[in-house]
């Protein structure tokens, strides 16, 4: 190589430095967007600020006894922790730091998950960087001040442990997710498939109620009753009677005149749809590879809120997150994260910008197409049946 060529041709070290600078720029952009953007929304002023002030004025014990927050004790503990920053930071920043912290944790586990697929190279770093700047994720935490990042982080951690073939830890992480928000149930169809495929043992499901009960103990010691803390989710489901709360799902197409009967039928439709998907997936003889497992997790968290009534516009948040991971595991699905970002962005704009609900219909159409593509892709993948895969591994070991 001549001296002139050495000046022009980039060295591996220079390529690495450029990649590192690009990643630093992504993380800096994501962090700045979270810390220095956003506004005080109705949820923030009507609920979070009231809860925050009540804890400051009366203490955590009084807040628990008065059932101030319609969330689980686990959420209360985390939220109460933000009040420790009151003398240092404005309350809006202190509250938003909680989901931002969980954004950072989930970003780390996205890196760990993608590293399973790519043991070498920079793709896991790029996956983490892109995840951290997904628009709907930082809009949810920084712009909106919502807490969906909390339970979704534990869903991502749960998926990581299942990929590492550590189902006990996977169920424990799911249990923690469930103790924070009821929307963790979007992951349940995926867990049932793992059970039927013998990736999880039946007794490990008892970890979920055990974790919930354990997290309730401090709340009871502070003055809440067992009846109250154990029935929080039952009372939450009665708060909203709408067929859909601007969620880009199946029910946005139903005329409001028939919303009441459609609500009753909707739960039957959801059960039959999810049961059908679970059964057909369980009967599929193909091996659950890491690529397939990530795909199934994505379908679970996107199909469930799509067919369930009473869903909110934010409930596709786990799908927004896992779609990027699925695209790295299944590169043919590179367009799926873009589609989910568009549909969720349209739904969020209706609330944040006070737009008419018409964009939600476009988001629902996008989600319909995405789910059809994902399910067709799932059953058309040319992966080897389980027995064939096992025979192949035996042959390789003998050689």
Image (cartoon, rainbow, N blue to C red):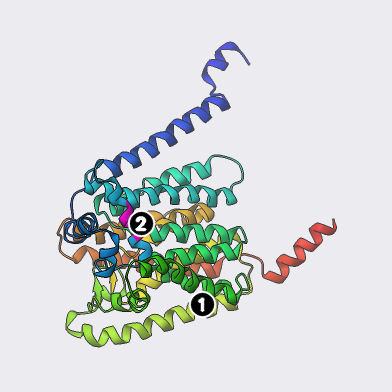
> Neighbour class for label 1 at 10 Å: few (<14), some, many (≥20)?
many
Magenta segment includes 33 = no
CB-based contact (under 8 Å), mark 2 and mark 1:
no
Which percent across, then down, holds residue 42?
A: 16, 59
Which portion, as a residue range, is magenta?
77-81
Disc 2 secondary structure class: helix
Distance, label 2 to label 1, CA atoms, is: 34 Å
Q: Tell whether 4 sits left or right of 221.
A: right
The dominant secondary structure in magenta is helix
Mark 1, residue position: 278
Residue displayed at 35% across by 79% down? 227
Which percent across, then down, holds residue 378?
A: 52, 67
Q: Nearer the viewer, residue 196 or 8?
A: 196
Mark 2, residue position: 78
Q: Is residue 181 visible?
A: no
Q: Is the N terminus in the top left, top right, bottom left or bottom right quadrant?
A: top right
Which percent across, then down, holds residue 131?
A: 41, 48
Residue displayed at 54% across by 57% down? 160
Q: Is the C terminus in the top left, top right, bottom left or bottom right quadrant?
A: bottom right
Q: Nearer the viewer, residue 326 or 39?
A: 39
Residue displayed at 57% across by 16% down? 6
Pick out the residue farthest to the top.
3
> Neighbour class for label 2 at 10 Å: few (<14), some, many (≥20)?
some
């Amino acid at each position: 190589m001549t001296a002139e060529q050495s000046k022009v041709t980039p060295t591996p070290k220079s390529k690495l430095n450029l990649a590192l600078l690009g990643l630093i720029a992504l993380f800096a952009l994501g962090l700045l967007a979270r810390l220095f953007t956003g506004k005080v929304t109705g949820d923030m002023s009507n609920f979070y600020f009231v809860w925050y002030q009540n804890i400051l004025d009366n203490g955590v014990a009084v807040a628990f006894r008065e059932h101030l927050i319609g969330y689980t004790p686990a959420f209360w503990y985390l939220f109460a922790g933000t009040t420790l920053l009151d003398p240092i930071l404005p309350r809006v920043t202190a509250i938003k730091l909680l989901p931002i912290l969980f954004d950072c944790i989930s970003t780390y586990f996205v890196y760990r998950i993608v590293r399973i697929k790519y043991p070498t190279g920079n793709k896991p770093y790029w996956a983490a960087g892109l995840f951290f700047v997904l628009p709907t994720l930082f809009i949810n935490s920084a712009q909106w001040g919502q807490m969906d990042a909390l339970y979704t982080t534990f869903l991502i951690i749960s998926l990581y442990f299942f990929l590492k073939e550590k189902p006990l830890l996977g169920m424990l992480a799911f249990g923690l997710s469930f103790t924070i928000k009821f929307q963790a149930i979007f992951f349940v169809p995926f867990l049932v498939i793992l059970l039927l495929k013998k990736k999880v043992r039946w007794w490990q499901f008892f970890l979920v109620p055990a974790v919930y009960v354990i997290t309730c103990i401090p709340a009871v010691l502070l003055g809440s009753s067992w009846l109250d803390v154990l029935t929080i989710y039952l009372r939450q489901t009665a708060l909203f009677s709408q067929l859909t709360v601007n969620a880009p799902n199946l029910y946005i197409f139903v005329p409001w005149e028939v919303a009441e009967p459609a609500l009753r039928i909707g739960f039957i439709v959801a059960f039959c749809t999810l049961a059908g998907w679970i059964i057909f997936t369980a009967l599929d003889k193909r091996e659950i590879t890491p690529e397939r497992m990530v795909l199934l997790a994505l379908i679970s968290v996107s199909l469930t809120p799509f067919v369930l009534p009473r869903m909110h516009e934010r409930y596709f948040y786990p799908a927004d997150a896992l779609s990027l991971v699925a695209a790295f595991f299944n590169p043919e699905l590179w367009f799926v994260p873009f589609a989910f970002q568009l549909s969720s962005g349209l739904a969020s704009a209706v609330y944040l910008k006070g737009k008419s609900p018409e964009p939600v219909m476009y988001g629902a159409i996008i989600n319909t197409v995405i789910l059809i593509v994902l399910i067709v892709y799932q059953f058309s993948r040319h992966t080897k049946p389980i027995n064939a895969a096992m025979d192949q591994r035996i042959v390789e070991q003998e050689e």
